[in-house]
Amino acid sequence: MNQEEFLKITGLEKVPVYWDRRYTKNLDKLSKPIYTMKLEEDVEVILRDGTKTYVDVYHPAEIDRAPSLIAYSAYSKKMQRMRHGSLPGASNYFDHSLEAGDMEFFVTRGYTFIVPDGRGIGRSEGEYLGVYNPQEQEDVYDYIEWAGTECQWSTEKVALLGYSYFGIIQALVAALQPPHLVCIMPLSYTDDYYQHGYYGGVADTYMNMYWELCPSNNPVPWTTKMMSEEEMKKRIEEVQEDPDIAINTYFSKIFNVWPPKYHTFYLDYLLHPQEDDFWRPRSMKYKYDKLKVPVYFKCGWAPTGRWSAPVFNAMNSKELTAYKRCGVMEGYNGMELPYRFMNEEMLRWYDHWMKGIDTGITEEPPMKLNILGRGYRYEYEYPLARTVWKKLYLHTFGNLRWEPVPEGSLPPDSFTHRPPHITTEVETLTYRTDRLSRPTEFTGPIELHLWASIDSTDANFIVKLHQITPGGTRMPVCRTGSLKASYPLDKEKSQIGRPVHDYTKRIPVTPGEIREYVIEINPIGMVFPAGSQIELEIKAMDNFQPQSGAWQAKMDHLGPIPSANTINYKIYRDKDYPSYILMPYIPETPGELWLQPVTDDDIVIGGSGSGNTH
């Protein structure tokens, strides 16, 4: 069929680039946009402890009840319906919290769409205790049960949807097993919230953003529920003794407010620098056995943070026995908000589970990957069974080569980290391959084995893997990894391409000792074209570049919190100490795994706009 016929059959104006004609069934039965949307604003919902909160309910005006989709975050419900065109990340008006989704798309197709202002958000009563806290998880359970039993515009069938915050909360709530929850579809996901905030144990200012994104009328740190006032004040003083923290005036402002009402979640973050009982209730990896409803995990090949690996962790989890599938969907272009890129895939998913329409989505292979530079295909496992693990060795003169260094006892490379209160310069080491002679695919997890010494008891390693185009420029999407040197490797739990460290304890490094550090780098799914190169960058700090010239609110884009000390790094790469990147080379892919377009048109445009996925 052509695009015009597709529109007539499906009621969809866009042909999804991620659909396959072999698995799309009953397209004529997909929910059509035949309804008008009506808004019920500030509907009162009383939570189980009597707290009064408010939700906005969007529903089809022409029918009494419809299955409900709940989009939950602490980002404010009213702003989720603001429409000023689709905005890329480069726009000055871009707001990453506009992530509830496209209520018009779903309501006009016969769904009720509910967006709460949770406890302590907007005009809702109660204390806001920070993202994904156990109380919040119970509250979303209550919203699901309210929708399934009391909401006059809803049937008994309820699902969760949404991107980022709206996505991560879904599995945590599903693990509580609310009776009326039918399915979930997290559009971005992480299963280890400690690692998400302290990637490789390295503290970051990333989570500082929640202060501006969550409009709370009564913010309270969760740590106040874990400690007495005396214990918490003592912890605040102890954390401020960390020289990396003590040097930052923004941190001082957060610590020296009592009662603690300023940047409350980031205060929590700083008070828990190691994995403990603050982080575990927010981490789905401890609860997979509790998730019983069908789940569709989605992510992009995210350059920063830890967004991609958790999706594959969930797919590989033996404890998660419910029906599950995943998609790594976005490409170089990132996304635009309001988020619409996955509308059509969500419709197939929710129509299948909520309306009993056999859309064919459960017949697809379990993993659908967008291989950057090549296109969409299916896979059955991760890492791919046909992976050939290739070692890309660090050599002298900044070279990366597939063969090991033949000589030993070579002098190391070195760089010196100088903290940002004495210089703006960031020293790095870079290693680059020769130009690739043919298109080459790498898809899967990556790890760096780095032999190094430092003249300190601890230090941050920040590494980036870049694609260098044939013209010599770095591609905007890179692979990132980080590790705080004092966290020990757990060899028993580590798997190939997926090193595991114990983040519950620090073991000081012996200054000058040559040690092997194994560093996880974000997973990759990419074809490097002929004439391109692979570049490894090693450094100790990583400022967020897009706003590096701004004078205000520097903490918002400080990136990984740098050491306050001058530290010399020595990087060894010879026969005695072979430093290398373990790369997941894919030599070939059977033709039947590649998606076959739904329409016969020569060109199907399926991008998601400019910007960054996160």
Image (cartoon, grey):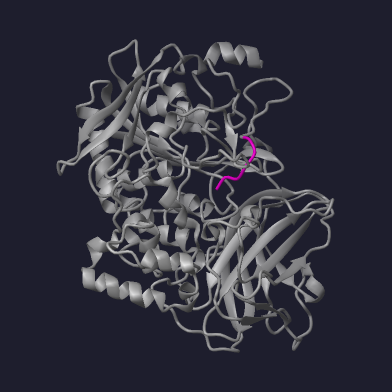
Q: Residue 229 location, x and y as percent?
A: 22, 68
Vertical order, 385 against 514 (above or below): above
Determine if the magenta segment contains residue 228.
Answer: no
Q: Quadrant of residue 111?
A: top left
Vertical order, 528 against 278 (above or below): above
Q: Residue 120 location, x and y as percent?
A: 28, 45
Is any atom of residue 275 visible in this view?
no
Q: Quadrant of the N terminus?
A: top right
Nearest to the observer: residue 198 or residue 77: 77
What kind of secondary structure does the magenta stretch mostly adopt?
A: loop
Nearest to the observer: residue 281 or residue 87: 87
Residue at 58% in and 14% down: 7
Which region shows up in magenta? 609-614
Residue at 37% in and 49% down: 320
Q: Residue 234 location, x and y as percent?
A: 29, 75
Residue at 44% in and 77% down: 242
Residue at 56% in and 85% down: 456
Vertical order, 598 against 241 (above or below): above
Is any atom of residue 579 visible in this view?
yes
